[in-house]
Amino acid sequence: MDIDAAHHSPTRVAVRLEYATVALAASEALAALISGLLASSVALVAFGADSVIEMLSAVVVLGQLRTLVRDRSNGRFSEHRSHRLLAALFMALAIYVTLSALWALLRAHHAHENALGIVVSVASCIAMPLLAILKRNSARHLGDHGLTSLSRLMSADAAETSLCALLALSTLVGVVLASIHWWWADPVASLVVVYFALHEGKEAWECGPE
């Protein structure tokens, strides 16, 4: 196998994973946002917003992968900007979730029951951890083929996918507890993700091409 083929093989796998992420995240975002708005659920709307960011993250990585395939020599600055964009997405999510949750707590806001929200949360709790594992494996293979910076970018995207899985779990807990009249559980559940979003945002910001 020649060098280009060796590099393109892990890149193709990464591309497929990012396309899968876009499709899954788009479906999640649509279902979570609709159910969240209908139920007036901060946790579900936050989950939907996170799914939008997950989709944008996948698009960023896809763009970088295409740049690598076209011209590997011109990708370093683009990779650095991609890391910074991912960091900004993490930070934006943390700020949005914090403000929304605090506003709901101050207003003693009560979310309504919503079966669709529970279904999409359960589905994400299953699908997202698996996708994150596959992305981490892909990142390792990229590193093994000498694509160090792209491997780090893929790892940052895998962290965002893991974050989405965590938020799906906290959303599920919050929605279920809110359905038994623990109204505060819905906004509190959404706050679980803030620490991890800030941590992963810092990590992504510090990443860059070597």
Image (spheres, rainbow, N blue to C red):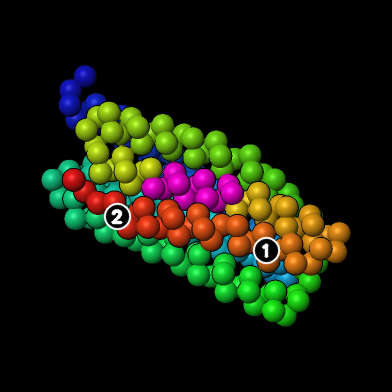
The amino acid type, in three-letter code, at marker 2 is Glu
Q: Which residues are magenta?
A: 156-166
Task: Measuring from the top left, give residue 153's x and y in whole percent.
Answer: 33, 47
Report the amino acid beneath label 1.
Val
Q: Give the answer, above or below, for where 111 lies relative to 58.
A: below
- Within 10 Å of disc 1 (Cα), the crowding (few <14, some 14-19, many 20+) is many
**Mark 2 residue crowding within 10 angstroms, few (<14) / some (14–19) / many (20+):** few
Is 162 within the magenta?
yes
Image location of residue 124, percent across then percent down? 62, 46
For image coordinates 55% across by 63% down, the residue present is 49
Give the residue number, with chain letter if any, for mark 1.
Answer: 188
Left or right for 94, reference 32? left
Choose between 162 and 120: the one closer to the eye. 162
**Looking at the image, can residue 22 be seen?**
no
Q: Does 144 sit above or below residue 23?
A: above
Asked if labels 1 and 2 touch by Cβ distance under 8 angstroms, the answer is no
Q: Residue at x 75, y 58 (%)?
A: 175
Q: Give the residue drawn at x 60%, y 57%.
A: 192
Residue sitting at x 37%, y 57%: 202
Query: Which of these two is toward me, 174 or 146?
Result: 174
**Residue receiving disc 2:** 206
